[in-house]
Image: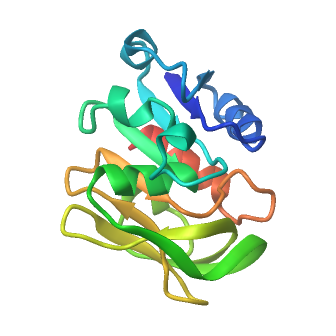
Amino acid sequence: MQVLIIDNYDSFVYNIKQLIEKLGHSASLVANDRITEADLRDADRVIISPGPGNPSYEEDRGATDKMLRLGEKKVLGICFGHQLLGMMLGCNIRVADRIMHGEIDRIRHASSPIYRGVPETFEAVRYHSLVIEQNDRVIVDATSLTDGSIMGFHTPDMMVFGIQFHPESFYTKSGETILKNFLEA
């Protein structure tokens, strides 16, 4: 399987690439302001990486929202990518009640194929200052036990998934399983 990772200029992107390759798939990185239709056409799955900034600002999100057509391929957004996908689906983005910078949190998930085999409550690393608010286009499938903020969502057609936490972090329990499940979903 060919996985396109849209790089939002974040060093964590290389950890994601290594995990995808460890799981036996090819992964290519393309910067968010250099993405082309050919990059997307050649990919079987798309992952939108973490990154600095606010997806509300074009200079932070690059061309991702202009190039990506939701519903054509399975897409996973991580952290900034989660927020960007939420924004593309009409969710409001706001400053989090609690800023999390490299902190371990307890997450509870509900029904979603990306959490298959993951304990209902698990530890994950959070590194963000923004969160999304739910709307009727997303199904919230994971929340923080600390502050109740949305930690994961999917669309009703199971084509778009977002996770606010970092599955590529060593301290995120079940992170590799979550990425594997996304690739197999």
62 shown above or below 107: above
181 shown above or below 34: below
Residue at the image position 24 percent from the left and 70 percent from the top: 135
State the residue lying farthest toward the top: 38
Q: Tell me how many marks there are.
A: 0
Residue at the image position 46 percent from the left and 32 percent from the top: 46
Name the side, left or right, on which 125 lies relative to 76: right
Give the percent coordinates (x, y) of residue 122. 63, 76
Quarter of the image that includes the C terminus: top left
Give the percent coordinates (x, y) of residue 93. 42, 66
Closer to us: 2 or 70: 70
Name the side, left or right, on which 135 lies relative to 169: left
Give the percent coordinates (x, y) of residue 111. 35, 70
Closer to us: 163 or 110: 163
Location of residue 33 (image quadrant): top right
| Residue 74 visible in the snapshot | yes
Chosen colour scheme: rainbow
| Residue 48 visible in the snapshot | no
159 shown above or below 126: above
Give the percent coordinates (x, y) of residue 5. 57, 30
Residue at the image position 38 percent from the left and 63 percent from the top: 153
Closer to us: 181 or 32: 32
Residue at the image position 54 percent from the left and 74 percent from the top: 95
